[in-house]
Image: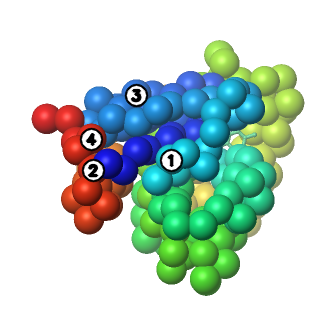
Amino acid sequence: MASILLLYRTRTGFTKKYVDWITQEIACRTVPWEQINNVDINSFDIIIYGAGMHAGRIQGLREFKKMTSGLVGKRIVVFATGAAPNTEEIVAKLKADNFSENELIHIPFFYFQSGMNYEKMSLSGKAIMKVYSKFLELKNNKSDIEDGTSKAILNSYDHSCRAYIKPMVNCLKEFLTKDGGTHIIG
Ligand SMILES: Cc1cc2nc3c(=O)[nH]c(=O)nc-3n(C[C@H](O)[C@H](O)[C@H](O)COP(=O)(O)O)c2cc1C
């Protein structure tokens, strides 16, 4: 029976919200990154990593890749949450900036739009967003995406949606069917 570990990092709660939705559909052991030492990752067949975007990078992905690089016979799945909308152009850039071509062949990747939470953001996070929104505001010849982003990031908002997880849930269900798992809920 295939078992699933879902490791995640969350700073302002969006990734945790998606983790909760995923675990309502697929039974997994969920572990926040800070508690990684309490778990034997080698005892799981499928290892999922989820985290928020930070200046174009999936937070902590490099450490996660390092940790799982020596593992044999595991299925690895990664998802990211971010304020940007889920467009083909944005997701293509995100993949190119965070994965090698070879990794993209072996690691299914999913992107879920979330939002911005200024109430829970660190002071440094707030400062970075302020500088970035000013930079976009002053930029000449903004693309539609940059124009939309400069307005969207001024305030807190939440565009998270449970339906966005469907492709990832389907991928996990396919793995479980192939690997002989019985962890599908509902
Ligand atoms: C400093 C900072 C940088 C960010 N950079 C990006 C980014 O490059 N792309 C994006 O889509 N969202 C970006 N965001 C938004 C977060 O990725 C988004 O809110 C994410 O869901 C946060 O996840 P968490 O609440 O689980 O930590 C950024 C937020 C902060 C505070």
Amino acid type for the residue under numbered disc 4: His
> On the rendered structure, is 57 left or right of 32?
right
Q: Nearer the viewer, mark 2 or mark 3?
A: 2
Query: What percent of the width, then of the height, locates residue 52?
Result: 61, 42
Disc ID at residue 183: 4
Query: What percent of the width, then of the height, locates residue 84?
Result: 53, 51
Amino acid type for the residue under numbered disc 1: Phe
Q: CA distance from mark 3 to mark 1?
A: 19 Å
Label 1, ligand 1: CB separation under 8 Å: no
Disc nearer the start of the sequence (2/3): 3
Of the pair 10 and 176, the residue shown nearer to us: 176
Q: Nearer the viewer, mark 3 or mark 1?
A: 1
Disc ID at residue 44: 1
Q: CA distance from mark 4 to mark 1?
A: 13 Å
Q: Residue furthest left?
A: 186
Secondary structure state at the residue bearing disc 2:
loop
> Which residue is denoted by mark 2 in the rendering?
181
The answer to whether residue 142 is visible is: no
Amino acid type for the residue under numbered disc 3: Asp
Mark 3 residue crowding within 10 angstroms, few (<14) / some (14–19) / many (20+)? few
> Which residue is denoted by mark 3 in the rendering?
20
Task: Tell whether label 1 touches label 4 (CB within 8 Å).
Answer: no
Secondary structure state at the residue bearing disc 1:
loop
Mark 2 residue crowding within 10 angstroms, few (<14) / some (14–19) / many (20+)? some
